[in-house]
Amino acid sequence: MAQFIAHCRARGLSVTPQRLAIYHALLTSSQHPSAEDIYRRIRRQHPTISLATVYKTLETLEQEGFISKVTPLHVTARYDANRARHHHLICVRCQAIEDFSTEALEHLPLPQEVTGSWRILDYTVQVLGLCRECQKKERA
């Protein structure tokens, strides 16, 4: 959190209790929470916070590079404070998201017919499937 506060101040962003609570909720979650999830989690400690404030703060944190938006299946935006290079496994049924990293994808050659005249800056891979729990339910 000290590093986050220093970065906010260096970028001219106010360090508010609400902003700290939102970022902390992201840092301590492995679930890639939605704005609504974060709102429900922090409103007990910050009863005057609005859902709109959570959305605005998440947009600011994403624009400033503190977090990234993960949008599985284009349904609801979910957020990730893990800025290390990684990819996502996404369950198409329950929409659970798990992070994964593998050296095999770190230098993925993208063919010219795919990239065309684009200069690729970065990429992430989203793998769609069924999580363990949904597979169990399917077998039952």
Image (spheres, helix red, strand yellow):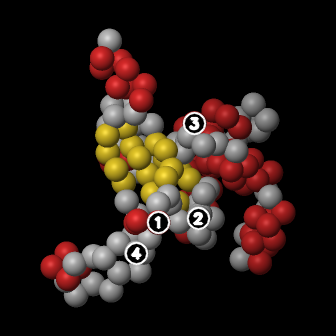
Q: Is residue 14 visible?
A: no
* Residues packed near mark 1 inside 10 Å, few (<14), some (14 to 19) or many (20 plus): few
Q: Amino acid at mark 1?
A: Glu
* Badge 1 element: helix
Q: Amino acid at mark 2?
A: Ala
Q: Which residue is mark 2?
A: 84
Q: Could you tell me residue 14's position as x and y percent? A: 77, 65
Q: Which residue is mark 1?
A: 103
Of pointers 2 and 4, the one earlier in the residue sequence: 2
Q: Report, in whole angstroms, how far the alpha carbon at label 3 lies from the one at label 2.
A: 23 Å
The earlier-in-sequence mark between 3 and 4 is 3
Q: Amino acid at mark 4?
A: His
- The quadrant of the rendering that contains the C terminus is top left
Query: What is the distance, in whole Å, between disc 4 and disc 1 at their CAs?
Result: 8 Å
**Residue plotted at (30% across, 76% down):** 109
Residue 107, numbered label: 4
